[in-house]
Every structure is written in structure tokens, then in C-alpha cells.
Image: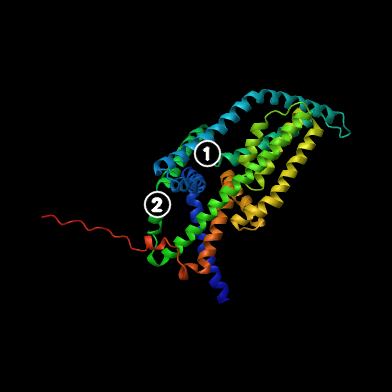
Amino acid sequence: MRIAAAWSWRILVVAAVVALVGFVIVQLRLVAIPFFVALLLAALLVPFSNWLQRHGWPKWLAVAVNELAVIAVVAGLITVVVIQVRSGFPDLQKQTLAKYEELKDFLLASPLHLTETDIENYFDGLVTSISEDTSALVEQGFDLASLGGHILAGTLLALFVTLFILIDGRGIWNWVVKVFPMRARPAIIGAGEAGWLTLSTFVRVQIFVAAIDAVGIGLGAFILGLFYGGFPLVIPIAIAVFLASFIPVVGAVVSGGLAVFVALVYLGPVPALIMLGIVILVQQLEGHVLQPLLVGAAVKVHPVAVVLAVATGGFVAGIPGALFAVPLVAVLNVMIGYIGRGEWRTNPHPSVADVTSPIVVPRRRREG
């Protein structure tokens, strides 16, 4: 009983702290989400910026090149998707309505004895359910009327935070470390360095995996269109697969389903089945080769934990929660493991010497 009680109150304290942190993050989600996005961008860009500086580039130029590259890539992807979707959406809508009428005629003539009212009620219920689920994932408490302003403000905030991390990330980290007591600083520094290395590795590996998914499904859709008279929206589908792949497991399934839907609407059932086979093949390659060998080695988290983290993050915080769940779990796993092993006692990180001195507050000079 004493052991159970000792464990119980400690678990309750930890759970209370986690709940409090989660509550604060939810309340400050307009700031927290851009901040987490900035951390992911910085984890990708800081090594490249340091590499440029080691090869003789001035710091201001290396930082400017990285920041402008992010803006150019994001703006380019958005522009391509908007142009392609605007040109192909009217035809997609027309084809979707035509396929709906064909399906309705098939169901009316089937042995199910369905009436037109039954079919319309089923489809209305399906559309309503999808709309509610999508709104719950996307909005997360935001007003749709102000969602555009939130996105713009969040984008600017993420870019500013990324810029400051590129300029003085080490100084910011040293300031954070000095908030902790002297005895805790070696553990915090070593755990933070290990977590940052894991986050950087995860982002680079995940970009590689997402690119393979996008190329595989996009190339399959393009080849399928060559044999069946054209496959529209190939580029937006490939970009959607690339972006959705940053949400492990779930993202690839959803984006692959979009490709299958477009194939069904434009080309028919047989090409849609072929597209489904291509999506499954690419996802099997990701799930059984790329994820275990690359992502698994980078995050050091079991695949079951990855699935549970994505599901929990999506349930708690929607799309942002699913996006940040795996890197958060990976970083916490590495940091807690580092502190638990006690390596910081016998082999402290070299940067410990920079922040082991206490904060000195200068005394104000007496006047008179």
C-alpha cells in the first residue's frame, strides 16, 4: 500500500502538471501553433544556415537566404495548388454530379429496393457528417469568419520566430536554461541538445519520406492518366500527399483517398481500383521500409506509440495535434531518457560551461 500510495500521488502530480500545460497551450493556441511550426522550420533550417556560415557566408546572408527560401517554397506551393484547383474544380464538380446521378440510377435499379428519397437522405447524412467532422478538425474553436486573419497572423508569427531562432537560437536557449536552478542546468542542457538533434533528424527524414510518397502517388496518377485519357489535378494531389505525409499514418491515407476519388470520378471504377493499388503499394513501402528504417531510427519510438500519439493528438487538438504529436513524443522520449540515464552527471554537454554561472543582476549605482 505504501508503494502504491507513493506511485499514486506522484502520478497525480505529473498528470496535473501535464493537464495544466495542455490547458495553457489550448488557451494560447493562436500563439502555440505558430511557435511549434517555427520550431519545426528552425530544426530544418538551422543546420543549413550553419553549413553556409562554415563555408564563408556572412551570418546575415545565410539567415536571409533560409528565410526567403521558406517564403518562396510555401508561396510557390500555394500558388500552384490555387491555379490548378481553380482551373480543374468546375470540371471536377460537373463530373462528380454526373457520377452521382449514375450511382443513383444504379441503386434505384438494384435489388435493394431503395427509393430516390432514401438515397438522397443517405447522401445528405453522409455530407453532413463529413462537414461536421472536417469543421471540428479545422476550426478547433476558431470562428470561420476570422480564420483567414488567424492564419495570416500565425504565418507571420511563425516566420518571425523562425527568423529569431536562426539569428540567435543559442542565446535564446541559454536564457531559457538560466531560468532553472544551477544544479539542474547540466541535465536541462544535455536533454535539450538531445531533443533538438532528434527533432532536426525527424524533420529531415519526414521531408524525405513525404517526398517519396508524393512522387510515387503523383507519378502513378500521371501514368494512369496516360493510359485512360488524362488524370486532372495530378500536381495538387501530389502536393496534398506531400503535406499530408507530415501526419504519420493518417495523412497518407486521407490524401491517397483523394487520389482514388478523382480517379473514380474522371476515369471510372477500374482506374480507381488501379489507383487504389498504387496508393496501397506506396503506403506499404512507407510503412514497412521507410518508417521503420528511417523515421523509426530518427525518433526511436515504437510504431504503436506513433499511431497512438497521432490518434490522441488528433482527438485532443485536431489537425495541429496530429501534426505535432509524433515529434513531441519523440523529443520527450529522448529528453526523459537522457535525464534518466544520468549521463549529464559523468559526461556533461560541452555547452554547460557557457551557462553554469548564475544570473548576475547589476546593482544600481547610488546617487549623491
Question: Do the residues bearing badges 1 and 2 touch, measured as CB atoms within 8 Å?
Answer: no
Mark found first going from the N terminus, 1 or 2: 1
Location of mark 1 (residue): 142
Q: Is residue 288 left or right of residue 43?
A: right
Q: Kindly tell me whether residue 132 is visible in this rendering.
A: no
* Residue 364 x, y percent position in the rendering: 20, 56
Q: Which mark is residue 172?
A: 2
Q: Residue type at mark 1: give it.
A: Phe
Q: Residue type at mark 2: give it.
A: Ile
Residue 270 against residue 39 in the figure, above or below: above
Which label sits in the foreground, 1 or 2? Answer: 2
Residue 196 against residue 357 in the figure, above or below: above
Location of residue 176 by image quarter: bottom left
* Residue 4 x, y percent position in the rendering: 58, 73
Outermost bottom residue: 2
- Residue at 66 percent across and 34 percent down: it is 237
